Amino acid sequence: MKRISLIAILFVSALFFKATAQETTVNEKLSEVNDKVTGITERLATAESDLSKLTKIKISGYIQAQYQMFESPALESTSNNYFSIRRARVKFTYEATDGIKFVLQPDFAPGALSLKDAYVVLNDRWTKSFSLTAGKFNRPNYEVEYSSSQREMPERSAVIRALYPGERAIGAKLEYNPLNLPLHVQLALLNGTDGLTINNSAGVNLNPSENKDYDNYKDIMVRATYNLGLGSFGGLDFGAHGYFGSLKSNATSTLSSDYTTVTAIKFGDAVKRNWIGGEFQLFADLLGGMSLKGEYIAGNNASVGYSAVAAGTDPVKNPPVPGVANFQNNFAGYYLYFIKNLGKKNQFAFRYDYYDPNTDISGKDVAVAKFSPTDATVLKSKTSGKSDLATTTFGLALHHYFDDNLRISLAYDIVQNEKVGSAGLVTEDYTKADGTKVAKGMDYSKVVNQNALTLRIQAKF
């Protein structure tokens, strides 16, 4: 009996130790599997985090390739017809979190690489009505903010190109969009000298850097628009905008736009640039869809001159350089669009575009009205010329949409300058839109031919 009990005890012990060993092995394997699963989970979490970031990035853009032909024969070595890349842009939009957005848009056009947009938008999370934009962005104006990929004519109107060179500016903008009211208000504080050339007596641009202000003056822009529903007929947007800015004088005198009044002004004082405008956009669900859009802007613009430079020790080798007065000119400009859809794939557009850079000088006064200083060594004389001529452009365009991303456009611009009187001969070289030059003495009593044909293909993504 004792022998049987001992055998039983040994047998049970063996089973116990075997079970314990198996349990240890199983636990080790379970731990190993758990570690692997945990590692996979961590990698998946990292991948999901990275994927989440990628989903917050939106990439879009477009390329505009075109052929242009200018009717005026080219002078010298300038071509009057050529292929070119008008725009090649990629836009990166990153939604960092709810209410915060970053935008970056470079333009890769050959020979003209530039940064078009670089700004951050902070949206109001409480009332959902306000937003703050800071960086480089479009100035608050309808045709400026209307994307080049959607616009019905190849280029913006003359008055917009003159007032807002490059369209963008660096600054900050506050926007108000109430939830229960179709109102949009924009208030921007800008450097104001973006895109302007301000030369000194040596012809050196004093405003070469786009990333900083030329002076301490800041410009204010304000725009307000309201949307009015017209039932099944369509809708009407209307509004107004104003620009209130200054440039630092680099001269000691300022001429008014009639060339006769000279206003004393100190070096460094403000030369005002103020204008206001009204706009409307009528959209009608009529005969396949049509729209009528227009804007009128008027006020006073300005350019900066420079002070006189005294003669050096050798008046022959270093003669005195007479100063150039600042110039304040009253201007007016407007444009009117008519757009009609032709079926689902085609669209016709017409634009009447008028810009008068100096409303105080008529055609018969060009090269006649002038300012003559009493001391020619102190201030140069200034005579009205090509910069005072009003321009009228009739634009026609036909678009074919292959799909939402591909459009081909054929546009023709008929450009007419204000005619001058028989005694008015422009005495300055004139450079046309295509870069060709008209020599001195050209009689503008005949319309200068600046008509241009544009064939453009646009691809969006």
Image (cartoon, rainbow, N blue to C red):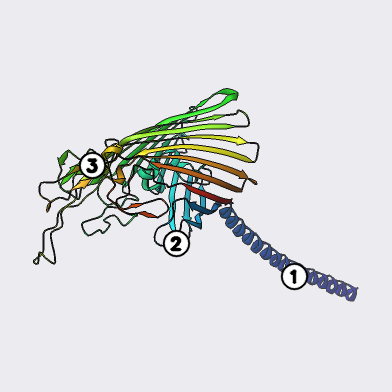
**Residue 47: x percent and y percent?**
61, 59
Q: Is residue 328 left or right of residue 172?
A: left
CA neighbours of label 1 inside 10 A, class few (<14), some (14 to 19), many (20+): few
Q: Which residue is mark 3?
A: 368
Please report contact status of discs 3 and 2: CB closer than 8 Å, yes or no: no
Disc 1 to disc 3, C-alpha distance: 106 Å
Residue 90 in view here: no
Taking depth in this image into account, of 39 and 43 the one nearest to the observer is 43
User: Residue sitting at 28 percent across and 44 percent down?
Assistant: 218
Which labelled disc corresponds to residue 222? none
- Give the amino acid at mark 2: Gly
Image vertical order of residue 307 relative to residue 133, above or below? below
Q: Which residue is mark 2?
A: 111
Image vertical order of residue 59 relative to residue 359, above or below? below
**Residue 346: x percent and y percent?**
62, 40
- Give the amino acid at mark 1: Thr
In the rendered structure, which disc, 2 or 1, sits on the residue that comes first in sequence? 1
Task: Judge depth for marks 2 and 1 and give the one in front.
Answer: 2
Disc 2 to disc 1, C-alpha distance: 71 Å
Task: Judge depth for marks 3 and 2 and give the one in front.
Answer: 3
Q: Which residue is mark 1?
A: 25
The quarter in which the N terminus is drawn is bottom right
| Mark 3 secondary-structure assignment | loop
